[in-house]
Structures are given as structure tokens and as C-alpha cells.
Image (spheres, rainbow, N blue to C red):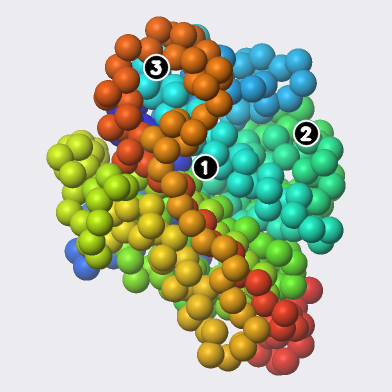
Amino acid sequence: MASLSLGEPRRRGGANNSSNSSNAASASTSSSTQPGTRSSLFADESIRSTDSDALISRLSALQAGYLPAERKGSSERSSFSHYLLPMGTPLPLPKRPPIINIGTALRCLTIDQHVERFLLKGDQMKQIISLGAGSDARYFRILADEALSARLAHYVELDFSQLTRAKVERIARADPLRKSLQGMRVEANGTALRSASYAILPGDLRELADPSKSAALQHTLWSILHPSLPTLILAECVLSYLPAQDSTSLLTFLSRRFSNISALSYDMCISGSDRLGEAPKPSKFGSVMLSNLAARGLTLEGAKECTTPLAYAEKFALAFGADAATSEDSKVVDSGCTNLRQVWAEMNAEERSRWSRLEGLDEVEELEILLEHYGVSWATRERGADPLETDEGQPVS
């Protein structure tokens, strides 16, 4: 779907391997596709295969002029994202249709704005956990912005070990990326990377909350991240693919670790976001999306549970309130959602007109239907309690 719509995930799911334990986002796993089974391995590979689609879509929108340069004076071919292309990728890159370029740009800019607000709010240092990060170059874009990088203490990415290995290799080959990382070291047989403020870790999100399966990864995470720092959980096209129980366990697990936590997600919404009801059925367009993805071996268990942007926001609020009974000063202070159609409608009229002229947009109705089926959701919980403690009762640093 990445090539047909905006939603093909940047591979997210997990390889069922404790030493490579990694990644992200997780492929859908029903009772017949539990991690490690043949059908699960096929689903995981299908999810991983979408990573380059998402990266090329971003580069297409960048080259067409919808997105600003990733760093001063850079072109599409000298952007951070371009350095993360797989070796041997044929050039020039394929161009996406205008409606895909517009949707991709809206997605990128909307997430950017939320991340920037998170980093710049207050005086505290912040940390970000990016689930299923794939080939995303967000950390390097933050690093290139002096105001944003000054507020970032730690940035951790989790994804499939196959994907983290490839990303580590590409970073090591690219001088502009490698030289920007202080104290960079490669670990876990090439599947992990650590530096002063950046880490890439292999892990299976379906199992992260289970200490019997992910004890080593949990230990590594807690050695990097401080429980008292405001922490953003970033999930782009991740929750759509996680079964409901797994995503709830993951969010609750992370929520209980950090005093002040925020979540931000971008996902497909198969009912269209204006439909009401507790569990709206897929729209006609949403049904086509499901069918197209199923043909590629992708099952959207999470998208079938959360069919609107509001459902994702409510999922965050529920997970963040799971331990509220043990902390009277815990509260969700902000939660909300939007869809890309609303973002497009509220865009500065002059800029929207410029975008429409860039490639001669004439598929307005098709664009609006597409944008209606992708949403951005968020929630924030602030808590004044002391940092969470380890089983031994000592604060984790």
C-alpha cells in the first residue's frame, strides 16, 4: 500500500530472536500467526519489505518540493534520508503520484510539528522512543536543528534486527551520518548501535513487555532511558499492525516506566475518521485498503480494532491510566487526534495552492478520500511522583 496510499508501514515488527531481539513494530499476529510460526515469519517479512517504500515516498515528496530540505543547502540526493537508501537502489528514484506526495508531506510535517512541540515544551531535557523506526532519519534531522537537539537527551529506535542491521551498516558508510554520532559503537553482531544520545536496538514489540522473552532488551533500554525525563513514544504505521492485546501490553508497560509520558502515532483508519460508533465498520475505501494489503501478506489486526483516529487516542489514554489507582497525581492532560484531510483543509491557503500547482493536482476528490483514512493521534500524561524503581527499590538511571 505504500505505493498506492500513504500507509505502508515503515517495517515494524519483530524478529523472534533474543540476541537480535529487535524491531519493531510488529507484524500482525492472530492466534494462527504467533511469533516464530511459518505464517508469522511470512507476515514479518511482508512488513519489513515496506520500509524502502516509505523511504522512497519521503524522498519523492522532498524532490517534488513539498518538504523542506532536511539540512541547510541539501538537495534530495544529499539529504539524511538519501543516505539510508539500500545499496544498489536504482537512480533516479521513482516519482510518486501527486496525491501520494501530498499525503506523505502532510504526514511528515504533522508529525514533525508534534515532535518539535514536545521537545521545546518546558526546560527539561526530553527523550524519544521510536517504535518501528525503519529507515527514518528523524534523529539526524533533530540533530541538525540547534534548538531541538539542545533539548534531546536520548533517542532510541526499535525495529526488526534485519532492519536495524541494514540501518547500522548504512550509517557506518555515510560520513555525514557517522561523524555526527559522538562515541558511536556497533554492538550485537552489527544489529545495534550506541552513541552519546542515539541508539538503534533490535527487538520484537510483541514481546517487549514480557521479561521472560525480552529481559536483555529491557535491561538495555533502562540503562539508556531515565524514568523521570519526559518521554515520547513515537509510532508511525506501527499500531495498525500490532494485535490489540500486544499493543495494549506494550503501551501499558512503557507507561508504567516513565513519570511523564506522551504518545504520538500515525496510522491508517479503515472506517474513515468521521464515522461514529464504538467499532465502526470499514468504509468501502477501507475495505479496499485491507484487501490490497492482504494480497501482500499484511494483516492489520490493530487497524481492525482502532478504525478511527479517536480510537487510537482513547487507546493511549486507557493505557496511560492503567495504573492511575496507584498514583493520585497522575493525569492525562492532553489527548486528541486529527486526520490528514483536516490537516489539508486547515493548511495555509497560499501554501495549499502552491502544493496543488507543483504537479498539477487534479484528483481532489480522490485525495480527500485518501486523506480521510489516515490519522494522527496523541496523548500525554504528567505525573509528579518520584521516578519508578527497580525490583530492588533503587531508581533506574
Which of marks 2 and 3 precedes in the sequence? 3
Q: Amino acid at mark 3?
A: Pro
Name above or below for residue 293 compared with residue 32.
above
User: What residue do we see at 73% from left, 32% from top?
Assistant: 177
- The nearer-to-camera label among 1 and 2 is 2
Q: Amino acid at mark 1?
A: Gly
Name above or below for residue 249 compared with residue 111.
below
Q: Amino acid at mark 2?
A: Ala
Residue ID for mark 1: 134
Give how far apart the Cα atoms at labels 3 and 2 are: 28 Å
Residue ID for mark 3: 98
- Quarter occupied by the N terminus: top left
- Quarter occupied by the C terminus: bottom right
Point out which mark residue 70 bears.
none
Instruction: Tell me where residue 147 appears, x and y as whole percent.
Output: 82, 41
Q: Secondary structure at mark 3?
A: helix
- Asked whether residue 96 is in view, the answer is yes
User: What residue do we see at 27% from left, 23% from top?
Assistant: 365
- The nearer-to-camera label among 3 and 1 is 3
User: What residue do we see at 56% from left, 71% from top?
Assistant: 332
Give how far apart the Cα atoms at labels 1 and 2 are: 20 Å
Please indicate whether residue 125 sits to the left or right of residue 164 in the image. right
- Asked which quadrant contains residue 262, the reply is bottom right
- The nearer-to-camera label among 3 and 2 is 3
Instruction: Tell me where residue 19 appears, x and y as whole percent.
Output: 54, 62
Residue ID for mark 2: 144
Instruction: Tell me where residue 350 appears, x and y as whole percent.
Output: 55, 17
Do the CB atoms of the residues marked 3 and 2 lie less than 8 Å apart?
no
